[in-house]
């Protein structure tokens, strides 16, 4: 890695994410101490959520490994790769491997909840998929109806990316999933999302897109 460290990767109202060198090697550090005062408690809740999920997913290849976490900071292993919108994977094997990785998450009762954003999917140097940014993810003790709905949304968002980069390999069943968003997704789009966008972009001046575009 030639870039000088520490290297700022992202800064927003929830704090900053930095690539640092530590005794554990290259580490990605989420730090909420610079979060906007009004939302610092949310930033800490999201950090705690990410720490719990990464602990559950410990040992799974293709997701960051939790190194340490406290109230304000979280260190996770650095996954070397290229964001999807830059790497633009067109091989069907990438999406088959991504689907297998997603099934591993779901078997551990974890939903990612943010796979709509292309920067959260990486093309590693080995050409394999990896998922990052688990602050919106959720570990469910039981697989109830809400878990199943959110897991299906994970799948649907992955299929949107497949449609973008590898559309010729979509199956009939996958096309049906794409054409039928869940009721929860439709409610979000009609009611919650407009309010969310107004508050984050107009009031807080924050736009969490990172080059991925709005993928509804």
Image: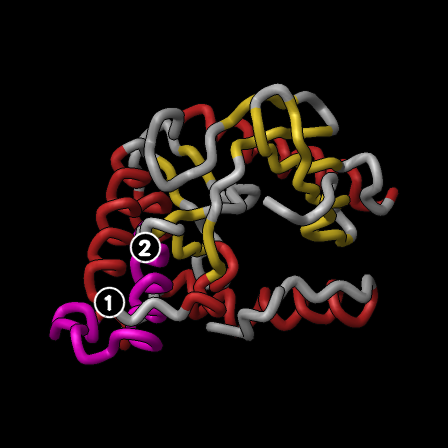
Give 73 or 124, whichever is nearer the viewer: 124
Q: Is residue 114 left or right of residue 163?
A: right
- Residue 197 position, x and y percent, is 67, 69
Q: Residue furthest front?
A: 2
Give 17 or 141, whichever is nearer the viewer: 17
Query: In the picture, which quadrant includes the N terminus?
Result: top right
Per the image, label 1 sits on a secondary structure element best described as loop
Q: Residue furthest left?
A: 172
Vertical placement of 56 versus 172: above or below? above
Q: Which residue is mark 2?
A: 127
Vertical placement of 34 versus 177: above or below? above
- Residue 5 position, x and y percent, is 72, 40
Quarter occupied by residue 176: bottom left
Task: Write the start and end of the magenta stretch as one range.
Answer: 151-176
Q: Is residue 107 left or right of residue 30?
A: left
- Residue 42 position, x and y percent, is 71, 41
- Residue 31 position, x and y percent, is 74, 36
Q: Is residue 163 left or right of residue 14?
A: left
Give 75 or 153, whichever is nearer the viewer: 75
Q: Cβ–Cβ below 8 Å for labels 1 and 2?
A: yes
The secondary structure that most of the magenta stretch takes on is: helix
Estimate the spatial distance between the alpha carbons at disc 1 and disc 2, rounded to whole Å. Answer: 9 Å
Q: Residues within 10 Å of mark 2 (few under 14, many from 20)?
A: some
Is residue 168 shown in magenta? Answer: yes
Q: Is residue 149 left or right of residue 167?
A: right
Q: Residue furthest bottom?
A: 168
Earlier sequence position, callout 1 versus callout 2: 1
Q: Residues within 10 Å of mark 1 (few under 14, many from 20)?
A: few
For the point 52% across and 32% down, which residue is it? 77
Q: Which label was assigned to residue 91?
A: 1
Give 70 or 90, whichever is nearer the viewer: 90
């Amino acid at each position: 890695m030639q870039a000088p460290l520490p290297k700022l990767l992202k800064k927003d109202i929830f704090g900053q994410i930095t690539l640092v060198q530590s005794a554990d090697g290259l580490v990605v550090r989420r730090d909420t101490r610079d979060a906007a005062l009004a939302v610092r408690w949310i930033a800490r809740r999201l950090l705690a959520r990410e720490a719990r999920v990464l602990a559950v997913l410990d040992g799974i290849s293709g997701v960051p490994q939790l190194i340490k976490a406290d109230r304000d900071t979280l260190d996770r292993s650095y996954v070397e790769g290229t964001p999807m919108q830059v790497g633009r994977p067109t091989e069907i094997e990438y999406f088959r491997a991504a689907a297998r990785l997603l099934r591993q998450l779901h078997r551990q009762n974890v939903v990612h909840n943010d796979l709509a954003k292309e920067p959260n999917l990486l093309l590693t140097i080995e050409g394999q998929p990896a998922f990052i940014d688990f602050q919106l993810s959720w570990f469910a003790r039981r697989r109830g109806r809400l878990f199943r709905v959110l897991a299906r949304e994970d799948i649907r968002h992955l299929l949107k990316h497949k449609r973008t980069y590898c559309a010729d390999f979509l199956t009939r069943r996958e096309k049906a999933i794409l054409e039928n968003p869940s009721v929860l997704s439709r409610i979000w789009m009609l009611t919650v999302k407009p309010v969310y966008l107004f508050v984050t972009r107009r009031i807080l001046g924050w736009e969490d897109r990172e080059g991925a575009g709005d993928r509804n």
